[in-house]
Amino acid sequence: MRALYQSKDRIEAQLLKDYLASYHIRAVVHGEFLIGAAGELPVLPFPVLWVLEERDFERARALVEHFLAQESAVTDWQCSYCGELNERQFHQCWNCSTLRE
Ligand SMILES: [Zn+2]
């Protein structure tokens, strides 16, 4: 297991985890549930995404970069499958669940 990315918030970390899962890369988010467990586990300020399989790491890193580049794009996007217009923060069509290209 290898630390891949420190996320700015839990929602982003979860989105990235789901995004990687859609490419059959297994990842877990650590840090979000540790608050309140002080004394036993270190309290991490931000959730960290971990890739379970070492062999997936380089691919996962490229996917995260791709995801973050999309996230910072300023425009809404049109679904290539159903033509629905989606807001920029979504990486999946709200109407038909097609992943953003
Ligand atoms: Zn669609």
Image (cartoon, helix red, strand yellow):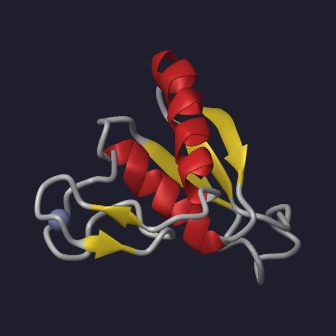
x 30%, y 72%: residue: 85
Left or right of 14, for residue 10: right
x 11%, y 64%: residue: 82
Left or right of 35, for residue 99: left
- Ligand 1 quadrant? bottom left
Measured as percent of width and height from the top left, residue 24 is found at 29, 36
Q: Is residue 57 above or below residue 74?
A: above
Question: Nearest the camera: 87 or 92?
Answer: 87
Residue 39, by quadrant, is: bottom right
Where the C terminus falls, by quadrant? Answer: top left
Question: Nearest the camera: 88 or 51?
Answer: 88
x 51%, y 70%: residue: 89
Question: Nearest the camera: 44 or 75?
Answer: 75
Residue 40, by quadrant, is: bottom right
Measured as percent of width and height from the top left, residue 22 is found at 29, 45
x 52%, y 64%: residue: 75
Left or right of 89, for residue 48: right
Measured as percent of width and height from the top left, residue 90 is found at 42, 68
Q: Is residue 39 above or below residue 48?
A: below
Where the N terminus falls, by quadrant? Answer: top right
Residue furthest top in the image? 55
Residue 45, by quadrant, is: bottom right
Measured as percent of width and height from the top left, residue 78 is found at 30, 62
Q: Is residue 73 above or below residue 56?
A: below
